[in-house]
Every structure is written in C-alpha cells, then in structure tokens.
Amino acid sequence: MNRLLIGLAAIAGTGLLLLRGTELRSAPQRPSASVQYLEGDAYQKSRAYSPAVTTTGGRIIWLAGQTGLQDANGKSFAGDFDGQARTALQLIDRTLKREGASLQNLVSMTVFINDPRNGDRLVNLRREFFPAGKFPASTLITVSNFAQPGMMIEIQGVAVVNQ
C-alpha cells in the first residue's frame, strides 16, 4: 500500500511540474541586448548613418526630444548650429547615463533641423560623437519652426541596453 501511495504521489508531482513548466526558474532570466548594425551603401556611410539596426533582448529607452539653446553655464547658442547640436547630443548622453547607458546605446534618432544647409554639419558631428562608426539609424527632417525662438535643432532617439 505504501508503494502505491508513493508511486501516485510521484506521478502527481511530475504532472504538476509538467503543467507549470516555464513558470519554474531557479533564477530570474534577463535577456541580454544584441545589437547588429546593417552596413550601409557608400552614400549612407558618407552621411554617417546606418540604414537599419536590429536588436534583440535588452531594455528599450525612449528619449524625448533634446535641444541645446544654451550650455550648462547659461551661455546662449542662438544662431550656433554646432553648439546646439553638440549640447543636444550631450544631453541625450547624460540622460542615458542616468539609466546605465550612453550615447553608444542609441540605435535610432530622429533629427529635426530648421535649415537643410545644416545637414552636412550634422553628418560631421555624428562622426565626432560616434567615432567607432556604429551609427544609429537616422531620419533628418527639415521644419519651419520649433517650440522656442532661436532653436535650430531637436533630436529624439531610442536606445537599447542590457538589463
């Protein structure tokens, strides 16, 4: 009789384990981020952006648009595209660092500028901020006005980091 009860208990226990299956884990499983940059053609490389970035796993950070009308000391960058663009990228980097990431985790960026002639300047700045050549996928849009007078650029982005 004892053997029968022990056998039934073992069968019932095995059945419960099979039913619960993936719910049982010895330790929390966290996917690590994998990022792959699709190599661009000659034009895309010359414009310092990737046509696509594929990610799996990790944590996604959605960044609000950043602008740079002035530096940390209050110096105005009105009329200074490079100053505003550098400041916007630095603010994105600072925000990402608060989340344990950096600008190098940026996989996509949307850049709004008010003058298409500044597009070439942006390309040079992207090369400066992404020296390894792993550029985020990027869209450049020309707009007629921004939320504040004097703004010349706004950048929003998406970053992917390990958990």
Image: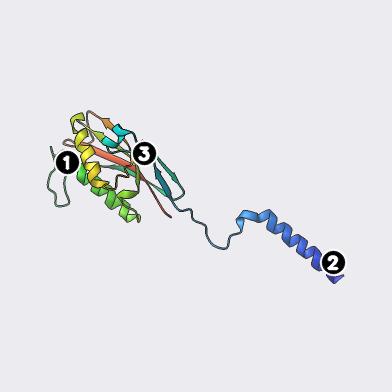
The answer to which of marks 2 and 1 sits earlier in the sequence is 2
Residue in the image at 30% along x and 49% along y: 103
Where is residue 117 shown, x and y percent of the image?
Answer: 18, 30
Picture disc at residue 40: none
Query: Which quadrant of the rendered structure holds the N terminus?
Result: bottom right
Q: What element carries label 1?
A: helix
Q: Which amino acid does label 3 sit on?
A: Glu
Q: How crowded is mark 3: few (under 14 residues within 10 Å), some or many (20 or more)?
A: some
Q: How crowded is mark 1: few (under 14 residues within 10 Å), some or many (20 or more)?
A: some
Q: How far across and down, in percent of the image, does residue 37 sit?
A: 38, 42
Q: Name the residue under label 1.
A: 82
Amino acid on which the number 1 mark rests in the picture = Asp
Q: Which mark is residue 39?
A: 3
Question: Which amino acid, by three-letter code, is at mark 2?
Answer: Leu
Quadrant in which residue 145 is drawn: top left
Residues under labels 1 and 3: Cα distance? 27 Å
Residue highlighted by disc 2: 4
Give the structural element (helix, strand or loop) at label 2.
Answer: helix
From the viewer's perspective, is the residue at label 1 or at label 3 nearer?
A: 3
Q: Foreground residue, 103 or 5? A: 103
